[in-house]
Amino acid sequence: MSTPEHRGVTAIADALRAAGLPEAAAGIRFLDDDVRTAAAAAEAIGVPVGAIANSLVFVADGAPLLVLTSGDHRADTTRLAALVGVTEVGKATPAFVREHTGQAIGGVAPIGHPVPLRTLVDSHLERYPVVWAAAGHPKSVFPTTYADLVTLTGGTAARVGVEEDDPSS
C-alpha cells in the first residue's frame, strides 16, 4: 500500500522501525477521511470499536498524562488521578496536546513525542489480538498488539475507564 508523505506519519513509521516493529510501520494505513473518533476509525478499518486505542492527553497536576483507552471506554479522571498519584486530572487544550506531543488532536500517536510521556494503557485492549492506534495524523493508523503498545510507550497497564455498555466495570 502506498502511504502519502506526511512528516508526522513518517516519524511514527521511523519510531516503530527503531523499536524493532517493522511490520507495524509497514502496516500504517492512510485512510480517505479523518478518523478523529474511535467509532470512525473502527468503521474505516472494519474492526470492533474496542480494538481502537484512543490516545487521550490529560493535564495531571500540570503535567501531561497520555492515556490509551479502548475505543469502547471513557476515561475516568478520578480513577486516573488515583492511578498516577495526583490530585487533579483534567482535559488538555489542543495547544497543550500539540506542545507535549508535537501532534494534533485526532491524530495523536502513542509514540513519537518530543519527550516520552507518562502513559497508562487500558488493560481492556488486551482482549484484542490486534489493536489500532493513530499514526501521527488524523487520517492514519497502525496495527500493533497490546503487549507491544505497553512496551513501545513504557506505559503502565491499568483499568482506566468504564465500558460504555457496563457502568459497573
Image (cartoon, grey):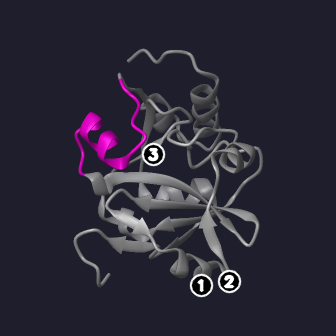
> In the image, what residue occupies the spot 60% across and 26% down?
10
Q: Position of residue 64 (x, y in %)?
A: 70, 60
Q: Is residue 34 found inside the magenta-colored segment of the image?
A: yes
Q: Are marks 1 and 2 in contact (CB under 8 Å)?
A: yes
Q: Position of residue 54 (x, y in %)?
A: 45, 53
Q: Which residues are magenta?
A: 33-48
Q: Classify residue 126 as left or right of residue 18.
A: left
Q: Report the residue marked by disc 2.
A: 85
> In the image, what residue occupies the spot 77% across and 50% down?
115
Q: Report the residue marked by disc 3.
A: 133
- As shown in the figure, which amino acid type bears the numbered disc 2? Gly
Q: Secondary structure at mark 2?
A: loop
Pick whichever of labels 3 and 2 is earlier in the sequence.
2
Pick whichever of labels 3 and 1 is earlier in the sequence.
1
Q: Quarter of the image containing the C terminus?
A: bottom left
Q: Secondary structure at mark 1?
A: helix
